[in-house]
Amino acid sequence: MVQLSTAVCLLGGLFLIAPVLMAPTHSSMCTPLRTINDSLSHRRRYMKHNFPIEYTIKVHNREIFRLSNISRMKLRTEGLNDLVLQRLWFQVYQGVLKKILWVLPTRHPSRPYTAELERRFKDAQAVFMQSHPAEVFQEDLPEKIQDIWDSLTEKPENMPESSWRFATPKSLLDNLCRTMYCLFSECFSNADVQEDCKYKRGNDTVGCNLFKNHPMSAFKWVHFVKMMSGINSPNSSLHNVSLDVKEASAFVFQILD
């Protein structure tokens, strides 16, 4: 149990550090990733304008991979290193691109674009594998990450219906782009990262740096304090309030979702 002022600082530190302190990206990765980025700059045309309104495809729920997922993993998985997140990113989005390509008829105007994006993604994945010693990829993954990995590689026919979700092709590529900027930020300009690593959540803006870019409204902060400390009066002093940091973190993530 800690004082509220300390807890808020701790939470601030966690949200500030956990999602954004990434290991240096190997320089050889930047060229193929920027090539992917060039393709993604056209995603609105090919993944939205060329599809019926509200068109969705069926994907594994783990393939809805957002900035908030990265933040949760950094906070909740002890000893999680950035290379593991990058490995998981490639595993997630190779499946996403296959699923998008699979639903496109041969003559669909977005098929050549998607096929080229998938090819560029595979090229980047190959460079990623070559940029690290083979032993790195033989190391055991943290248990929670291994569970995600196993679910992604499970045969579709063996997965329960609850494992599936529907998403628009553009939203999937939006997630790909934003998470790429965050996990490989050294390969992109600050302008790229600041612009595309942000997304709207209601009236708030969330980014790689979740705590900094997601200022909670006064109402949410009051609700936060009241729920975690049992304060009933808005005039109560905050200095004597205590709360559990894990519970506080869980509540803030609930707000972000």
Image: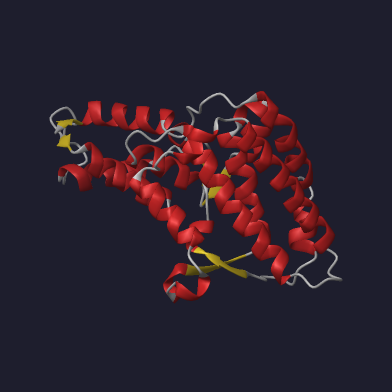
Q: Which of 71 and 243 is in front in this view?
A: 71
Observer able to see residue 191: no
**Rendered image quadrant of residue 106:** bottom right
Placement of 60 over or under 84, stated as above or below? below
Residue 214, x across and y down, in percent? 46, 38
Horizontally, is 102 left or right of 15 in the view? Answer: right
Q: Residue at x 39, y 36 (%)?
A: 80
Question: Is residue 220 positioned above or below 157 on the image?
Answer: above
Residue located 37% across and 41% down the image = 218
Question: Which residue appears at 75% of the width and 54% of the height?
Answer: 44
Left of 86 or right of it: where is 220? Answer: left
Please identify the quadrant where the N terminus is shown: top left
Compare residues 18 and 25 and report the one nearer the observer. Answer: 25
* Residue 83 screen position, x and y as percent: 50, 34
- Left or right side of 239 for 91: right
Residue drawn at the location 66% of the way across and 53% of the way down: 173
Residue in front for this viewpoint, 126 or 33: 126
Residue 176, percent across and down? Answer: 62, 48
> Residue 70: x, y in percent?
47, 42
Q: Which of 77 and 153 is in front in this view?
A: 153
Which quadrant of the view contains residue 222? top left
| Up/down of 183 relative to 112, above or below | above
